[in-house]
Image (spheres, rainbow, N blue to C red):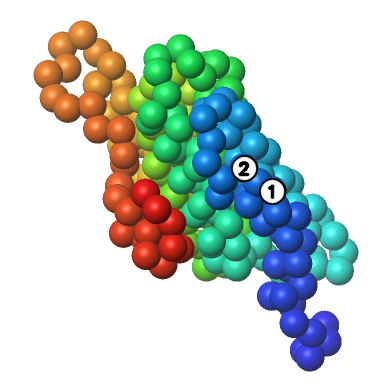
Amino acid sequence: MNVSRDIDGELKSYFEIFYFARDKFCLTNKVDHESEIRGCLNILGGVHATWQGLMDHEEYRYVTPQFSLIDDLIFITCFSLAQPLVDSKIGEIPDSLISEVTHVSLELLELMFTADSNPSDDIARYLENVLHISVMNCGPAWDIANTALNRYATLINDDMVGDNYQTLVNWIGPMVAFAEEANSEHFEGTRVLWANDIFFKENEDFDLDF
């Protein structure tokens, strides 16, 4: 491979269209929660498909996904998914849409921890917030996360990928367990909707008004 090439720049260029989409769906004031969620979901789905395509492309066969290159894109998109999920009324967002959000977020998290040579805990925390809110508010979303968790658990003893899937179990397991407990009849605690406070800590870095 030509060492003079700007591989990072090349990789990031493939995501330019998603930055335009982010500006449309994430950085404008929205009153329609469902449309905002659908727009941001399409961005995350496109990010996942693009990394997969690059991994399959002969020219980049020795290059692993580098999620940190598009940290700002994923941060804003995840917040713009999570906030309307928190703000929406019960039944306002279709379970099928929340389930798709859960599925795509899990796919991204799995891809990052199994393929990125230097996975980002910050990006994992962005996705953790989206997933936590989804599984708290939607039974089918919880089912998807629980099914994924059970699959991860079958792989933790694998010699090649066991550590990667143990990491996924460590991220997903607590939220699945908490959502199950919080939605039970005997739960007497507080239904905490944010898994962590990273969106608010990074507000100044991304110049967003929360």
Q: Is there any visible trace of residue 103 in the rendered image?
A: no
Query: What is the spatial separation of the Cα atoms under label 2 and label 1, in whole angstroms?
Result: 6 Å
Secondary element at tag 1 = helix
Percent across and percent down for residue 15 are 72, 59
Rendered position, 99 above or below 18 = above
Residue that appears at 46% across and 45% down: 79
Q: Residue furthest bottom?
A: 4
Image quarter where the N terminus lies is bottom right
Q: Residue furthest right?
A: 58
Q: Which residue is mark 1?
A: 21
Percent across and percent down for residue 137 are 39, 21
Rendered image quadrant of residue 46: top right
In this rendering, the count of numbered labels is 2
Q: Is there any visible trace of residue 49 in the rendered image?
A: yes
Rendered position, 149 above or below 210 = above
Percent across and percent down for residue 73 are 58, 57
Specify the amino acid type for callout 1.
Ala
Circle 1 Cα neighbour tier, 10 Å, few/some/many (<14 / 14–19 / ≥20): some
Rendered image quadrant of residue 116: bottom right
The one of 75 and 209 positioned closer to us in this rendering? 209
